[in-house]
Image: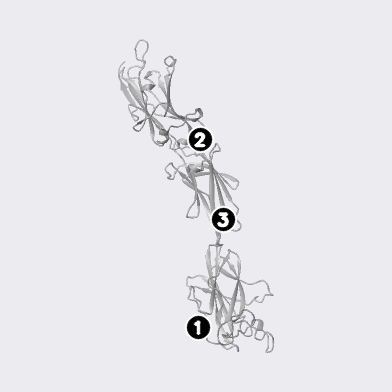
Amino acid sequence: MNFLGNYEILAKALNGDVVTYTIRVYNAGEVDGYASLIKDLLPVGLEFVETTDQTSEYYGIWNIDKMTDENGQEREVISTDHLAKGKGKELNSVEGDANYTANLLRALDDSKNVSDTEPKNPDYRDVQVLCRVKEQTNKVLVNYAQISADTDKNGNEIDDKDSTPDNLPKDGPHEDDEDLEKVQVKGPGKYNLVLVKEDKNGEQLNSTAEFEVTTNGKTETKKITGRLTIAENVTIDADHLTEDVYVIKETKAPDDYCKFDGTITITVTKKEKDDGTGYEKSVKYTVVDSKGNDITNKKDANVYLNNDGNIYVEVKNYEEPEIHKGVKDVTNQDSGYNADEVHTWVIESDIPSNLDNYKLYDIVDNIDYRLKFEGTNKVVVKIGNTTLKEGTDYKISFVENTNGVQNKTTSGKLTLTFLDTENGMNASTTLKNNQGKKIQVIFNTTFAKDENGNLLATLGEQIPNQAKLEYINTSSDNKVTKESEKPEVHSLEG
């Protein structure tokens, strides 16, 4: 006797689903007989369920035992003699009754074609069993069943010529008196949404920033140092297939960094896989700046689905530009000069790595009244060894303060403008090609004198002079002023 089945059947089921197995026993042997005992070894992840329909033919026919497998896991073994002689439909029947041989399986008639209608050839009987899926993850559950005992038409035990009773293998090979069914458990999917702060080089930025995060309409403020999981173990299953929408906006940048000017909108779409084995997700996003411009392709914010199944949101912060000043060179902070000697001042300032986000970029120097500016024609502006061109790369002006000596304030204001979009001045190609490098401004002064030719400064008197960087970028739209050191010169003569 044999089980009839297809080893490649793969059903789909969810955790908690009840699966109905139909076990078909057929007789391909040479004598009439009964399948007197059928056993089913349930895999881990399936549990037996008794039918609640007491009118069902299969109500109460299954016995349950426990066994521990080679992996130390407890499993259920269910068995039934429902198809044995005198059981099931034959119960309480006597010779001559219609059901007296209802369970008897006729021997195979090799002279006739295979038929699934009466008289069936080979002859077969069915029993059913209900099982519940209790596995949480995507997994194929393999359920084995077998004929454990059989008898002839008189109920006498017979030996099976080609298989061994109660020899249920875990993975095969499979004998002809056993069969298996496979159930693909369609477990729920999950994902995390992880926000990562990066510097201009794409390295994790371990400084604290603040974000406004809106998840499906609910808004929260989040502090992040380096990285933060802002949505954790988000479920994807049949009950959670609506889109998840996240809106992320930086509200406070890390110290010494510019705030990211962009609102990131992320849409996570969830659906069942085409092959029915589980669930999958897809991600799309847009980034819009404070003026409503789409800046998705600038890649200062990047959203992607990683191989670990999680969604990562990478947001870059660029360092705020700095300005430094010295006398003779940018690091020297004091120097003495003779009365008619020329002083050389050096200013260095960063060209922002995100220059496209800037609207204004000025270097300003209010020169002390005790100093005389030597003219814009002697100002040199460089990036490395490249000398920038006035009118192309920058504009320069010096506005004299006619009351400076009287008020003891400044002799005038030196301004170099590299970018002023509101007044139609965009960054030059040279500046754009040198983002992240430094601008160096070199100019000259001498000691100022009164109408009698006397120095306004006394012997050894320190004359400090400070430069300022004034800029506007889209992260705030407010003018930011950065101040340099205050290097000083002093007279070696009275």
Q: Which quarter of the image is occupied by the N terminus?
A: bottom right
Q: Which residue is mark 1?
A: 162
Q: Are marks 2 and 1 in contact (CB under 8 Å)?
A: no
The image shows residue 451 at horizontal and vertical percentages of: 37, 10
SS for dot 1:
loop
Residue nearest the viewer, comparing 343 with 178: 178
Dot 2: within a 10 Å radius of its alpha carbon, few (fewer than 14), some, or many (20 or more) residues? some
Q: Quadrant of residue 375?
A: top left
Report, in whole angstroms, how far the alpha carbon at label 3 lies from the one at label 1.
Answer: 49 Å
Q: Earlier in the sequence, mark 3 or mark 1?
A: 1
Q: Is residue 128 visible?
A: yes
The amino acid type of the residue labelled 1 equals Asp
Q: Which residue is mark 2?
A: 474
Q: Earlier in the sequence, mark 2 or mark 3?
A: 3
The amino acid type of the residue labelled 2 equals Thr
The amino acid type of the residue labelled 3 equals Thr
Q: Nearer the viewer, mark 2 or mark 3?
A: 2
Q: Quadrant of residue 398?
A: top left
Report, in whole angstroms, how far the alpha carbon at label 2 lies from the one at label 3.
Answer: 37 Å
Residue nearest the viewer, comparing 59 with 28: 28
Q: Quadrant of residue 37?
A: bottom right
Report, in whole angstroms, how far the alpha carbon at label 2 lies from the one at label 1.
Answer: 82 Å
Above or below residue 332? Residue 372 is above
In the picture, measured across the screen, residue 345 lies left or right of residue 360, that is left
The image shows residue 156 at horizontal and vertical percentages of: 57, 89
Give me the disc on residue 235. Answer: 3
Q: Nearer the viewer, mark 3 or mark 1?
A: 1
Dot 3: within a 10 Å radius of its alpha carbon, few (fewer than 14), some, or many (20 or more) residues? some
Q: Earlier in the sequence, mark 2 or mark 1?
A: 1
